[in-house]
């Protein structure tokens, strides 16, 4: 299946060279999890603080188990803030 | 000795009095709101002689506590018709605190049609007639006043917008680099302009540092406090690296980034105006990505943004400004937004009110969406010069909407709604509706818990838990705004218990008192209640605690959500 991965702030350095500034498309096996997707880019699971799938938060207890579906947009942020 | 200084502009006299017993232990917002509520008739005209403009440093301002240098200003707001407190960094708060001035109260209006300046030094407060700097922008005022005194005196000033008493006029405060920070919201610059004060300068020469009653205890508490700021990833890494503009991408991702005058929650060109892009641009052009708006700020979320030629363009370039001119007005060029930010600081208008106004103006056809050069021109040549159109634009989003017959006008209590769409970030919607200040994200920043997973998580799209969240945050914020602390200490405070306990320990060590956590909550509650009562007495009603109708009629893509709180649900906010 194909998903779109978006990485922001300090996590952008994990994007493959040549990606547009914040996103990359990815081929993953069916039923892949978030750690599977981030593992492809060697992004350690200790870094994400906020994760969205299709604009909805994934709660922290589900970070490592939530399965992705074809066409998902997965967006990952470190801890950030402002106001 | 701690004192209250009064400046009476009606007879051009000044006086000094001891801090009355009931004001001892107050600072910042608690002080300004208490004084305004006690001394300003709520139904007075905000630009008339009965209104008072009160400045107060926070309880811990002037001490060695990190991030404690915020200055509060309060008055009846000409924009909202209710009470107002606005706070900013800069060097003024620290100097007032060192001089022992717990509150500076400006009263009355001069009889003659003349302008004045006020100078505050160790043993004297003087009012002088001012003509040379009339019509000048804030950058030039700071520069010339500091040149006159031959030293970096603190400068609190109004630009042309304040002189013209525009409802969007702010009050500027010089920062350590003689750049501009703003007491932004609510038209306080118009109040200062109504009193015909062009600037206030403060000289701290010859005054000793502020000493705590218990130095050892203070030092220990302040060390723990500073460590929590460093340890929390938001205040220790995120804010210093990217500044507040890092929020563009996450609000866009969450579908809560108000775009094209609040008609969508996502902006296609978000990457062009994001904090990541801004950071890279600043570094490439030799600017400063990490900068403190006042001495002693440890978090340093501010920055210095240079133009293409590496020359200073603006600083304190915040998410809300960039969102407003960027996503809400669809201006993709960060340099245009930066130039507009510089002009807004210089002519002295609130960048949030002005950006929200331009979003409405673009929908009304005054200029096209995306016209960055048009915004720059209108700021400089219309608002800055006070042309007839400039006066219309300078009155803020609500006024513009009324004049052009618009229905999609994002304001609460006539104050522009910032940067987070209340339909998709419902907790902040409750804060906008119920806040005593009009729409003000800083008065109860539910975005932290709705979007940023700080202080837990409350689903931004669901109504559940939002009223309680907004209430608790507004109470805590009213207390924090009274300490002189920058609100960004709330990020560690929401997650690390020692942050708040060490803050209370610092206050106790400073004043030799014994506050508990509950006392701080009680202070926050009492500040909110004082402000709410003032608003009711001024004629605001619970019908003013509502969002504009279009939020409950028009659904916001991509989540296609509407604002669905009932009036009865909202009114439970005040059950405390
Ligand atoms: S964190 Fe930012 S806003 Fe707060 S005091 Fe520091 S520079 Fe100013």
Image (cartoon, rainbow, N blue to C red):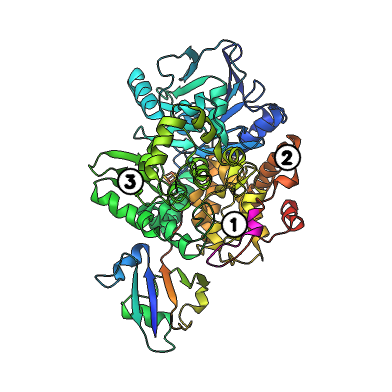
* Quarter of the rendering occupied by the N terminus of chain B: top right
Where residue B147 sits, quadrant-wise, is: top left
Apparent side of residue B452 relative to residue B139 in the rendered image (left or right): right
Apparent side of residue B544 relative to residue B210 in the rendered image (left or right): right
- Residue B2 % position (x, y): 56, 27
Given the current orientation, which residue lies at the most extreme bottom position? A30
- Dot 3 falls on which chain? B
Residue tagged by mark 2? Answer: B540
Instruction: State the image coordinates of residue B282 (x, y, percent, origin top left).
Output: 29, 49
Q: Chain of mark 2?
A: B
Seen from the viewer's position, the closer of residues B222 and B14 is B14
Measure the alpha-carbon separation of dots 3 and 2: 40 Å
- 1 and 2 marks in contact (CB < 8 Å): no
Q: Nearer the viewer, residue B223 or B427?
A: B427
Q: Earlier in the sequence, mark 1 or mark 2?
A: 1
Secondary structure under the numbered disc 1 in the rendered image: loop
- Left of B507 or right of it: where is B240? left
State yes or no: discs 3 and 2 in contact (Cβ < 8 Å). no
Most common SS among magenta residues: loop
Q: Residue at x 37, y 52 (%)?
A: B332
Q: Which residues are magenta?
A: B550-559
Q: Quadrant of ligand 1?
A: top left
Cα separation, mark 3 vs mark 1, equals: 28 Å
Q: Which residue is mark 1?
A: B422
Is the residue B329 above or below the residue B35 in the image? below
Taking the spot 64% from the left edge, 54% from the top edge, the residue there is: B550
The earlier-in-sequence mark between 3 and 1 is 3
């Amino acid at each position: 299946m194909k998903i779109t991965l978006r990485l922001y702030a300090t996590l952008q350095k994990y994007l493959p060279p040549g990606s547009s500034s914040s996103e990359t498309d990815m081929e993953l096996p069916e039923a892949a999890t978030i750690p599977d997707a981030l593992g492809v880019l060697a992004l350690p699971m200790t870094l994400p603080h906020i994760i969205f799938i299709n604009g909805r938060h994934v709660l922290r207890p589900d970070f490592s188990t939530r399965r992705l579906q074809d066409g998902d947009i997965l967006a990952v942020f470190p801890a950030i803030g402002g106001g | 000795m701690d004192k209250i200084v009064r400046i009476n502009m009606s007879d051009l006299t000044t006086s000094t009095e001891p801090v009355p017993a009931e004001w001892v232990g107050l600072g910042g917002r608690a002080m300004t709101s208490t004084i305004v509520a006690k001394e300003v008739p709520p139904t007075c005209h905000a630009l008339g002689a009965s209104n008072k403009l009160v400045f107060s440093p926070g309880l811990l301002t002037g001490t060695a506590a990190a991030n404690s240098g915020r200055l509060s200003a309060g008055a009846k707001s000409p924009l909202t018709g209710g009470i107002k407190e606005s706070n900013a960094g800069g060097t003024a708060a620290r100097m007032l605190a060192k001089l022992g001035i717990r509150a500076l109260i400006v009263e009355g209006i001069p009889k003659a049609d003349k302008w004045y300046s006020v100078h505050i030094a160790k043993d004297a407060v003087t009012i002088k007639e001012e003509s040379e700097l009339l019509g000048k922008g804030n950058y030039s005022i700071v520069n010339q006043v500091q040149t006159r005194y031959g030293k970096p005196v603190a400068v609190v000033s109004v630009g042309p917008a304040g002189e013209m008493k525009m409802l969007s006029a702010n009050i500027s405060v010089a920062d350590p680099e003689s750049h501009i920070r703003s007491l932004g919201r609510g038209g306080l610059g118009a109040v200062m302009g109504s009193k015909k004060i062009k600037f206030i300068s403060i000289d701290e020469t010859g005054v000793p540092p502020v000493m705590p009653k218990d130095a050892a205890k203070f030092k220990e508490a302040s060390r723990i406090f500073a460590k929590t700021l460093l340890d929390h990833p938001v205040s220790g890494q995120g804010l210093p690296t990217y500044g507040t503009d890092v929020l563009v991408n996450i609000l866009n991702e969450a579908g809560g980034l108000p775009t094209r005058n609040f008609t969508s929650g996502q902006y296609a060109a978000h990457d062009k105006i994001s904090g990541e892009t801004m950071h890279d641009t600043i570094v490439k052009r030799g600017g400063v990505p990490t900068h403190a708006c006042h001495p002693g700020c440890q978090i340093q979320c501010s920055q210095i943004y240079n133009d293409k030629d590496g020359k200073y363009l603006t600083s304190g370039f915040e998410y809300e400004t960039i969102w407003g001119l960027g996503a809400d007005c669809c201006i993709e060029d960060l340099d245009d937004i930066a130039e507009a930010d510089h002009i807004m600081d210089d002519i002295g208008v609130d960048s949030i009110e002005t950006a929200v106004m331009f979003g409405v103006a673009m929908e009304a056809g005054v200029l096209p969406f995306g016209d960055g050069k048009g915004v720059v021109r209108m700021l400089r040549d219309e608002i800055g010069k006070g042309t007839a159109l400039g006066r219309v634009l300078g009155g803020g989003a609500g006024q513009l909407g009324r004049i052009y017959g618009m229905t999609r006008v994002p304001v609460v209590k006539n104050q522009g709604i910032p940067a987070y769409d209340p339909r998709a970030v419902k907790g902040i919607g409750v804060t906008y509706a119920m806040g005593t200040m009009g729409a003000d994200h800083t008065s109860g920043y539910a975005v932290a818990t709705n979007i940023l997973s700080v202080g837990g998580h409350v689903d931004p799209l669901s109504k559940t838990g939002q009223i309680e969240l907004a209430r608790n945050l507004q109470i805590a914020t009213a207390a924090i705004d009274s300490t002189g602390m920058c609100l960004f200490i709330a990020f560690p405070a929401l997650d690390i218990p020692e942050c708040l306990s060490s803050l209370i320990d610092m206050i106790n060590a400073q004043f030799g008192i014994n506050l508990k956590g509950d006392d701080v909550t009680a202070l926050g509650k009492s500040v909110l209640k004082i402000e709410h009562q003032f608003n009711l007495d001024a004629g605001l009603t619970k019908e003013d605690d509502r969002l504009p109708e279009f939020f409950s009629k028009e659904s916001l893509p991509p989540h296609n959500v509407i604002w669905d709180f009932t009036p009865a649900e909202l009114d439970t906010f005040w059950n405390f």
